[in-house]
Amino acid sequence: MLTAEPIAHIYRDAAGVAWIDHTRVKVMEVALDHLAQSWSAEEIHRQHPDLSLAQIHAALGYYYDHQAAFDQQIAQDLTEAERLAGST
């Protein structure tokens, strides 16, 4: 009999930030590489060989499962960066 084995690769810290298991890499960082650079999972892996393809795909899947919240955070961060850049 086969049993299902969950493969998560993602955890959320106490502040609710999503991270890739056993790394210091946030899901947001992988999502931004994908969005801003138009990198595929394979290209992200070439740029960050310390991440497995499974970890990268899990991060991208997590991003797409929570895309509205991530996109809202990206927009807020961009607005804040532009505000700070204008105040110097």
Image (cartoon, rainbow, N blue to C red):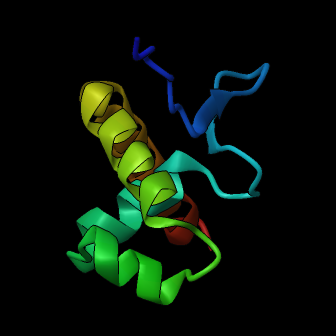
User: Residue at left 50%, top 54%?
Assistant: 55
- Residue 79 visible in rendering: yes
User: Residue at left 31%, top 69%?
Assistant: 41
Judge left or right: residue 40 versus residue 27.
left
- Where's residue 62, x and y in %? 38, 35
The one nearer the camera, 86 or 72, is 72
Q: Is residue 39 above or below residue 70?
A: below
**Residue at the bottom extreme?**
46
The one nearer the camera, 65 or 4, is 4
The one nearer the camera, 83 or 3, is 3
- Where's residue 40, x and y in %? 24, 73
Judge left or right: residue 67 versus residue 16.
left
Quadrant location of the N terminus?
A: top left
Q: Is residue 16 above or below residue 47?
A: above
- Where's residue 38, x and y in %? 20, 75
Q: Is residue 34 above or below residue 11?
A: below
Judge left or right: residue 81 versus residue 73.
right
Quadrant location of the C terminus?
A: bottom right
Please tell me how many numbered marks the rendered image carries.
0
- Residue 83 visible in rendering: no
- Where's residue 61, x and y in %? 31, 40
Q: Is residue 68 above or below residue 58?
A: above
User: Residue at left 53%, top 66%?
Assistant: 52
**Residue at the front extreme?**
1
The one nearer the camera, 66 or 42, is 42
